[in-house]
Image (tube, rainbow, N blue to C red):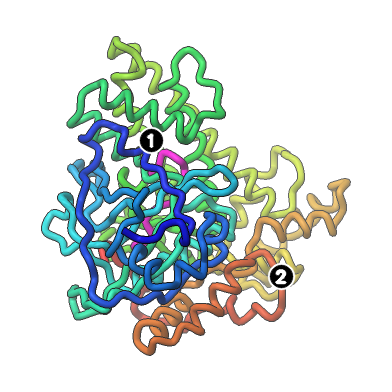
Amino acid sequence: MTNEKEQNWNLDNSYTKLPAIYYSIISPNPVSSPQIVKLNKTLATSLGLNVEELQGEEGIEVLAGNETPESGASLAQAYAGHQFGGFTMLGDGRALLIGEQLTPAGERFDLQLKGSGRTPYSRGGDGRAALGPMLREYIISEAMHALGIPTTRSLAVISTGESVFRETELPGAILTRVAASHLRFGTFQYGANWGKVEDLKELADYALNRHYSHVEKGENPYLTLLEEVIKRHASLIAKWQLVGFIHGVMNTDNMTISGETIDYGPCAFMNEYDPETVFSSIDTQGRYSYGNQPGIGGWNLARFAEALLPLLHEEEEKALELAQGAMEKYPELYHQNWLSGMRGKLGLFRQEKDDESLVENLLVMMHKYKADYTNTFRLLTIDKAEETVLYGNEEFTEWYKRWKTRLENQEEGKEAALNLMRQHNPFVIPRNHLVEEALEAAVEKEDYTVMDELLAVLSDPFNYSLEKEKYCSLPVPSSRPYQTYCGT
């Protein structure tokens, strides 16, 4: 056991109080020569951890999964999921929950080691992870946090000193992921399919207590749970759309009860605006394309609602009626969140009937002329419309006049509108080619300076600084579309 007092571990294990069907206690799978390659010192401090001790030998042993703090746990969670529409039993096949850190601010966060070795749910996999994908999750999750999007976060990346074998031999690594919890839609699907109603009820009560204790429960707490999860995902997916983020693998096991973004395998950010954009190498049908994400969010929520049916009402017909009533609110909730965000991106302070057509007309033009999504809004924000690819087209000229007239009619004034736009339009995003450059330097050359510089820029994405303009550049045109991969 490690000296947890010096490292300031303050761990609880409330998840182990749930029925045993939801997890498996496992033994650590030690690695030979772990080294810390990336530590999120700011996050560590907010968690109440001792940064200096974490970087010492005992701290690295914990982050590598070689040792468990005395007050910690060592478990893999069971869950199920619809993967590309097909339902299957799943679970943490390469992850280990070491406990729930109680922070100085009184918050509770799961600490999970990703790539820590085989578990009872590995299904033939080796349970390990490669360095590149773990660094990638670190970059993207921290960028999402800075963009103000609910997300799991990355505390550390450890190189294991061992190789993993995919298509080639790759250096191994373990990521420490921090989450409000790892409860998923698929956790409830697992309980509904392989547990008793009592097991499902305990899980729902646990979720309500952990994530929605501040919400008035009403006469039917499980309907409240469904309604609150719907609200959070209507907001979350709207935020994805507003920054051009494409998750890539919106299976029900990758949707959290807390409303945080989780699993950064095949995700990426859209360059030129196209609703059909897909980056995942295995999404050949475009199920999880940018334009499909809001609808898939609704589909996944419906599967969550189905899992809750036994708790909503003892009569199946009444339970279905309650679930459908809650689900009917999702499209409008999503649309309200998205349109409100779009108003912010265009500097519009209040709702007018023409707003939606103003937004849609701009998006249609962006698609037609293959305009970069982020840069178009950035250039409008800094009043440089002439630098967009839309400039000079008659339809854009007409749209631009409409938009300017709308802004001029606002009592708040031009400067207030531009300030509003700066709050909603990031100057920089984690451009796919820049992320790849950082990963190549780190993995191939053990040079982390490129990644560190990128992380520094991404940590303040709404800072409109000319020094950051090189991070707004587009990749060199290529005949090969950019692709991302799952399960690496």
Residue neighbourhood size for the residue with mark 1, other residues' Cα within 10 Å, grouped as few (<14), some (14–19), many (≥20): many
User: Are discs 2 and 1 less than 8 Å apart at CB?
Assistant: no
Q: What residue type is labelled 2?
A: Tyr
In the image, what residue occupies the spot 22% across and 35% down?
A: 20
Q: Where is residue 201 in the image (x, y as percent from the top left)?
A: 32, 23
Q: Position of residue 334 (x, y in %)?
A: 52, 39
* Quadrant occupied by the C terminus: bottom left
In the image, what residue occupies the spot 34% across and 70% down?
A: 133
For this orientation, the residue located farthest to the left is 124
Specify which label sits upstream in the sequence, 2 or 1.
Answer: 1
User: In the displayed structure, does residue 468 sit left or right of residue 58?
Assistant: right
User: In the displayed structure, does residue 265 sit left or right of residue 138?
Assistant: left
The correct choice, above or below, for 13 with respect to 290 in the image is: above
- In front: 305, or 109? 109
Q: In which quarter of the image is residue 266?
A: bottom left
In the image, what residue occupies the spot 47% across and 68% down?
A: 53
Mark 1 sits on what residue? 301
Mark 2 sits on what residue? 464
The correct choice, above or below, for 439 with respect to 208 in the image is: below
Element marked by disc 1 = helix
- 291 drawn magenta: no
* C-alpha distance separating marks 2 and 1: 37 Å
Residue neighbourhood size for the residue with mark 2, other residues' Cα within 10 Å, grouped as few (<14), some (14–19), many (≥20): some
- In front: 455, or 339? 455
Please state the extent of the stretch shown in magenta in the rendering. Answer: 255-266
Q: What residue type is labelled 1?
A: Leu
Which label number is shown at residue 43? none
